[in-house]
Image (cartoon, rainbow, N blue to C red):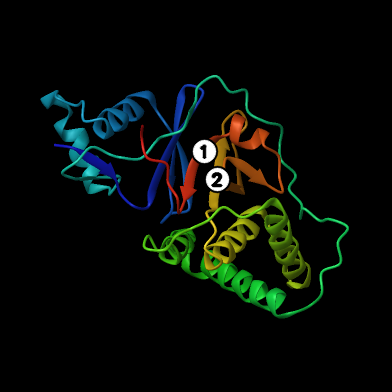
Amino acid sequence: MPYHLTDHIYITQFQDELILLDLKQDKYTVCFKEFADLVLQLLEGKVTDPSEDTAIQTLLDDRIVEEKENIYPFYIDKKSTSEGVANVDWRLPLENVRVPFDLEVVKAFLVLLKVNFYIKFRGFYSGIQSIKNAYNPTNSYTLPTQKELRKLANIVNKACLIYPTRTKCLEWAMTFVLLALKRKWKCNLEIGVQNYPFMAHAWIECNGHVVMDEDVLRDELAIILSEPFRKIKA
C-alpha cells in the first residue's frame, strides 16, 4: 500500500538526519534514524516487513502519513554533505530606490496584514493553505523579469516599513509570493533548514534563483517547504 505525507507535514534531510515540519503545530522535529528510515521507505513504497505494521499504524493515527493509490510524487530535498550556513541575520532587502506611496503599496500592506493575521491567529498551516488556494492550476504562469521582481520587492519593502511591527523573513516571503501569484508569476515560497545549530529561513525563489537574498541558501540549506509549485520527482 503506497503512502503519502499528509498535507500539513513536510520533510527534508540535512546531513544524516531527517527534519519534519508539522504546519498545524508550527513545529520542527529532528527525527531519530529508525523513524526517518520508515517514513522514507513508506513514501518510496518499499516497506514489506509485517513487523513494521504497528509503527505504520502509529504514523497513520498521528496523521503523519495517509494511504494513497500511487507512490508519493514529490521530490524530497536531501543535503547530506552540506555544512550549512552561518546564522542568517535577515533584514529587509532595501535598495536606494524611491517607492511612492500608491495603490500597489496599499495592496501589499493589506496582504502583509492578512499574512500576519494568519500566522498569529490562525496558524502556519492556514497561511500556507492561503498560498495553495491562491494558485490556480488552470492559469498560465509566466517568469517575471529581474526588473519586475525587484520592483515588487521594493513595493513589499515599502509596505513593511510602514507596518507597525517588524517584518521577519517568513512574512516578507509569504507577502511577496501572494502578490506574485496575483500577477500570474511563477514564484515559490521556500523554507530551508539546517541542524548544528538548528536554523530555519524563508525566501522567494524564481526560475532557480533566490530573489533579493543569497543563492547560497538554496545550495546549503535543506529545503523543507516549496509552495505552490512543488517539484515532482524525476
Specify whether 63 is left or right of 182.
Answer: left
Is disc 1 surrounded by few (<14), some (14 to 19) or many (20+) residues within 10 Å?
many
When the figure is inspected, residue 37 is found, relative to residue 211, above or below; the finding is above
Q: Label 2 amino acid? A: Ile
Q: Position of residue 225 (x, y in %)?
A: 48, 45
Q: Going from the N terminus, do you reach mark 1 or mark 2 first?
A: 2
> If the image is split into quadrants, where does the N terminus sit?
top left
Q: Which residue is mark 2?
A: 191
Element carrying mark 2: strand
> How far is mark 1 from mark 2, CA to CA?
6 Å
Residue at x 18%, y 28% (from the top left corner): 52
Tell me which corner region of the image, top left, top right, bottom left or bottom right, holds residue 53.
top left
When the figure is inspected, residue 192 is found, relative to residue 132, above or below; the finding is above
Specify whether 8 is left or right of 176.
Answer: left
Q: Label 1 amino acid? A: Ile
Residue lying farthest to the top in this orientation: 81
Q: Position of residue 202 (x, y in %)?
A: 60, 48
Q: Which residue is mark 1?
A: 223
